[in-house]
Image (tube, rainbow, N blue to C red):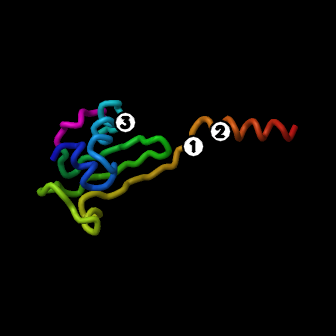
Amino acid sequence: MRLDKYLQVTGLIKRRVLASEACRRGLVRVNGIAVKPTREVAAGDSIIITLARREIEVKVLQEIKGISLKKALRSEYFETVRDIAITPVSELDDFWAEDSKDD
């Protein structure tokens, strides 16, 4: 199954168009390499998705044979290795501005 379709079917990214765009922008890496949305996903692959406020790493447990997947079955197809919240730079700037007012 194509990477963009895999991301959409598993619910990691809501729409296939967004998954495809994320791949084109280099926000999705498979086994540490930025890839195109047409790359085939195989069992054992590690996928890292860098979004605006979080970075997710999942391991593909098995390939999806059909074109859709029930929500209850999604956890059988991938395992979340890490899910890190990212603080946007603008929020950090606000934090440091607040801290300097106390001086």
**Residue 51, percent across and down?**
43, 42
- The local crowd at label 2, few if under 14, some if 14 to 19, many if 20 or more residues have their Cα within 10 Å, is few
Helix, strand or loop under label 3: loop
Q: Position of residue 76 (x, y in %)?
A: 25, 64
Q: Where are the magenta residues, as a range?
A: 32-40
Quadrant of res 25: top left
Magenta stretch containing residue 5, yes or no? no
| Residue for point 42% across, 52% down | 82
Dot placed on the residue nearer the N-terminal end, 1 or 2: 1
- Residue under numbered circle 3: 27
User: Pointer 1: what residue?
Assistant: 87
Residue 6 spot, x, y in % from top left? 23, 49
Q: Is residue 66 left or right of residue 8?
A: left
Q: In this picture, is 26 found above or below 31?
A: above
Quadrant in which the C terminus is drawn: top right
- Given residues 11 and 86, the one toward you in this image is 11
Sooner in the amino-acid sequence: mark 3 or mark 1: 3
Residue, disc 2: 92
| Residue in the image at 70% along x and 38% along y | 94
